[in-house]
Amino acid sequence: MAIEVGQPAPDFTLPNEDRENITLSEQRGSPVVLVFYPLDFSGVCTAEHCQIRDDYSSWLDQGAKIFGISRDSIFTHKVFKEQENLPYSLLADMKGEVAQLYGTWNADAAIAERLTVVIDREGNVAYTTKSGGIPEARDHSEVLAHIS
C-alpha cells in the first residue's frame, strides 16, 4: 500500500545509531523528511546521503529533521554515519516493518526501495518521490520546495 499526499503519515518508533528510540509523532511541530534506502555502504545509497549531507544547511534552513531509514542494524548505521560524516540520524528498520507501512518494502530483495517522504508540521504527508528502481538514485531537487 503506497502512501498518498494529504494523508496522516504512519507513526512508528525505530532506534537510531545511538540506540535512541525515535518516534515520528514526537517530531510534530517540525517538518520531517524520511529517506528510505536499501543499504548502508552501497554506491548509490552513499552518493544520495552525501548529496543530502553536502546541502544539509538548505534542509535545516527549512526547519526539517531528516531521518535515513534502512534495514541495516544500529551498529552498521553508526559506522556508515561516522565514515560519511552524516549530520542526521539513521534509523534501523531491520524487519522492514516501517518500509512496509510506507509501501516501499521489496520483499523479494528484503530491502527498502528508494522513497523520500516529506511530512508537514502537523504530521501529514506533503510530498513523496520514489526512484524508478533499486539501483536508480532519486531526484531530491524538488524536496526543499515541499518542506514547510
Image (cartoon, rainbow, N blue to C red):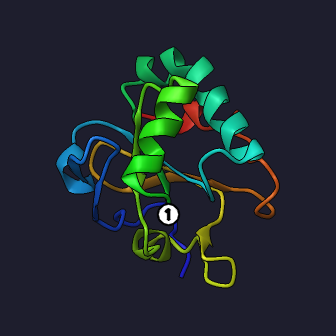
Q: Nearer the viewer, residue 16 or 10?
A: 16
Q: Residue at x 49, y 25 (%)?
A: 59
Left or right, 119 with respect to 36, comes to left
How far across and down, in percent of the image, does residue 23 sit? 22, 55
Q: Give the quadrant of residue 94.
A: bottom left
How far across and down, in percent of the image, does residue 75 sit? 40, 48
Q: Nearer the viewer, residue 130 or 123?
A: 130
Left or right, 44 with respect to 5, comes to right
Q: Nearer the viewer, residue 96 or 64?
A: 96
Mark 1 belongs to which amino acid?
A: Arg
Q: Residue at x 67, y 38 (%)?
A: 46
Left or right, 143 with respect to 48, comes to left
Which residue, given by chain and number where applicable, does mark 1 sit on? 71
Residue 110 at least partly seen = yes
How far across and down, in percent of the image, does residue 36 sit? 55, 55
Q: Residue at x 50, y 63 (%)?
A: 71
- For label 1, the crowd category at 10 Å Cα-Cα, with few meaning under 14, some 14 to 19 and many 20 or more, is many
How many labels, in total? 1
Q: Is residue 22 above or below residue 65?
A: below
Q: Give the quadrant of residue 148.
A: top left
SS of the residue under disc 1: loop
Q: Is residue 4 above or below residue 34?
A: below
Q: Residue at x 61, y 18 (%)?
A: 54
Residue 33 at least partly seen = no
How far across and down, in percent of the image, does residue 89 sit? 38, 38
